[in-house]
Amino acid sequence: MTPKPARTPDGGWGWVVAAAAFVVNGLSYGLLRSLGLALPDIAEHFDRASQDTAWVSSLALAVQQAASPVGSALSTRWGARPVVMTGGLLTSLGFVFSAFAGSLLHLYLGLGVLAGSGWALAFAPALGTLSRYFSRRRVLAVGLALTGNGASSLLLAPALQLLLDTFGWRGALLLLGAITLHLAPCGALLRPLELPGDPSVPPSGPLAALGLGLFTRRAFSVFALGTALVGGGYFVPYVHLAPHALDLGLGGYRAALVVAAAAVADAGARLVCGWLADQGWVPLPRLLAVSGALTGLALLAVGLVPGVGREEGWGGSLLAAAGAYGLSAGSYAPLVFGVLPGLVGIAGVVQATGLVMMLMSLGGLLGPPLSGFLRDETGDFTASFVACGSLVLSGSLVYLGLPGALPSCSPASPPATPPPESGELLPVPQVALLSPGGPHSTLDTTC
Amino acid sequence: MFVHDVPKAKTTAAVPVLPHVGLVRWHRSLIDTKALGETGASPVSNLPAREEMLAGFANLSLESHNISLTGQSSVAVEKNITLERPSIVELTCLFTTSGDPSSVRVTWRKGDELLEGDDPVSTAGGALWARYRFTIINSQQMGSYSCFFQDETEQRGTFNFKVPELHGKNKPLVTYVGDSTVLICKCQGCFPLNWTWYSSNGSAQVPLAGQTSGKYVINGTHANETRLKITQLSEEDQGAYRCRALFHLGASEDRVELVVLSYLVPLKPFLAIAAEALLLVAVILLCEMYTQKKKERPDDGKEFEQIEQLKSDDSNGIENNVPRYRKTESVGQ
């Protein structure tokens, strides 16, 4: 008998949900990044090359992103809370199963498929629910949640190393199974929220639940194309920034500094951009296009930076380019999710989040192998980063087709889209219409 | 003579695979066996004829090493040389002095033994070159060779000859009961004659051979590494394992520490952490149910009041325009 609230909470319990999403992000993406620490021990134990074990994390990442729509579909049917808790249980089982692995295949199944599916069930619903709890401070809240993986890398990486030294890789995976079980309490914190504009009947079938109908909206299709292009280049520095720094002649510690600079800039930018976007000075789609373009330019800079000798240079130009990449990529991340309510309405946010993850996974699957292939063909990473930068730039160009991205010169034009909180095509009951001039209005009447 | 006279460079002459024992026998057949290992000069080094015969047989490479002494440094000048296979060695010490070169006395020593030699000492300007040429065939000829220049003070340059060292990981290898593991020893850029594995139980060192039971299997894909695979691990297998690389000129060792744990060891923290996570879930859900109940109870009370009010208002009729609504409370607080 929960009464229908007239407005989104925009705070209050929303901050608890933000904290829960922070932990979910940390225990999924953050943990995945730190998992690379265990891979050399595993490779040695099973007497396989490091390329074979690298597939474990690639598979987990691919499954997590590609299966995200399933997570959001299930949560529109049953609510985010049970789905995220089930995801936590599934991930934990995957880790426990892989602790007893007898071959690399067991690891592919346990970590790659099981844990990846669990993460898919946890991430998109958590982030989607967070978007529903905020309106005026949505992008800040999302940015805050997305710093989770940076914080997790800082904490989990040394902790994982300690576990590996004390318990070996099997014991470390077993204990990670217990740690990832904390996704369940995070899911428990996702209290269901009813908002105006929510469909009163649950979706009829699995296809409807997936939200594929969202693609029929022009704005979302434009967004989907742009995001798929950006995804092709966005993830490459995760994999190839360190080898690129080493190729350019920087020593091990200098290369690590470059990666750290990008990570810190990324985390800081997520918060600052989140706060900035919420002020409403610039329409979100325009901010999205701008940050995407800056990311593309920064990737070009990273690729075109001249090499330095091993002794003299401290890689200042690469450091600056990596920092610029971190700042722009960090600004992009919360915007990708923050712009969704404006495109699909608050009711479709969870489904849209899942679809966005899947789109990015398409790029994530193609980008790093393409980059590696170019590197093998040309001898260094210049071509790779130039290709990635171009992909990101073309995606940003596509974003210019979003409503509100380009300034329109007609002050008297009627609103192109109604206020985001009530959704695009759904009827807008008068009582539920929030302040029309809200900060996330996609109108732009200035020239 | 086969050996090319390329200064400061190792000739890349292939050493044919000789059994170590065979080489020693050949060596002994040439010289007086009494001279081996005794004080006094190694006779081989003073007889060019034997050198040639050995060189011609074994295709020894030439190693040239120099040390420069300025006469002012009080620090002993040392050079570490890694030698893997038998070689002809040429040591040169360059001594610069401000005084008269001919008054400088030059001696060569191996360790503390004085080495005799008729190697030339040449002078040019204020500099003195002392050269000592000899052959290293076996491990007894390895060690430290020093040149001494007796001027007002004694200047010394030392060449330290060692076999290649093995550098392994210093971290213990953690495994579990019933599992199998592979211990690896690698030699960077060097190729030992053979490898041996030892397990040390306490102070005793027991060599491990590839037994038929299959518990220990030793093989290596390349000559510069060896792998010891142990299956069916139990807690008695815990301890330090040593791998020993044998060269013509000596041996070097490395140790790997193996730790065998039972599954109960990580199981206890696992259960503790998992229980804590489930407890959190229970606490969160219970708290929420509790706060929900608290909210619904005042609602029930108000509803009761409203029903009472309606009943009392019923008689008025027209004034019954009090809108009946429930207090809408947002779920989020």
Image: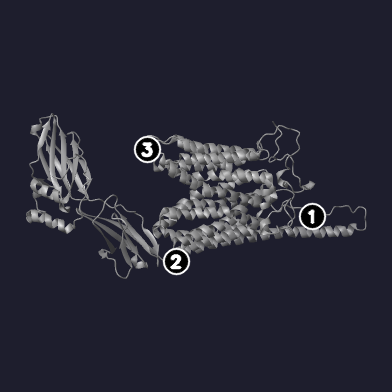
Question: Is residue B72 shown above or below B115?
Answer: above
Q: Nearer the viewer, mark 2 or mark 1?
A: 2
Which of the two residues, B74 or A309, is positioned nearer the viewer here?
A: A309
Report the residue at 29% width, 50% height from top. Answer: B188
Distance between the alpha carbons at the discs numbered 2 and 3: 48 Å
Instruction: Say whether residue A175 is left or right of residue B186.
Output: right
- Give how far across and how far down residue A402 sits, in percent: 66, 40
Q: Residue B312: percent from the left, percent from the top? A: 89, 58
Q: Which residue is mark 2?
A: B264
Is label 1 in a helix, a strand or a loop?
A: loop
Question: Which mark's residue is nearer the viewer, 2 or 3?
Answer: 3
| Residue highlighted by disc 3 | A310
Amino acid beneath label 2? Leu
Q: Are marks 1 and 3 in contact (CB under 8 Å)?
A: no
Q: Amino acid at mark 1?
A: Arg
The residue to which callout 1 is attached is B326
Measuring 32% from the left and 53% from the top, which residue is drawn there? B168
Q: Nearer the viewer, mark 1 or mark 3?
A: 3
Q: Tell me whether marks 2 and 1 sit on the same chain.
A: yes
Measuring 38% from the left and 36% from the top, which residue is drawn there? A309
Left or right for A6, reference A44: right
Q: Is residue B15 above or below residue A93?
A: above
Crowd class of label 2 (few under 14; some 14 to 19; many from 20; radius 10 Å): few
Element at label 2: helix
Indicate the quadrant where residue B29 lies.
bottom left
Closer-to-camera residue (A299/B38): A299
Query: Which chain is indicated by disc 2?
Result: B
Q: CA distance from mark 2 to mark 1?
A: 57 Å
User: Which residue appears at 64% of the width and 51% of the height?
Assistant: A128
Which amino acid is tagged 3? Arg
Could you classify mark 3 by the number of other residues whose Cα lies within 10 Å: few (under 14), some (14-19), or many (20 or more)? some
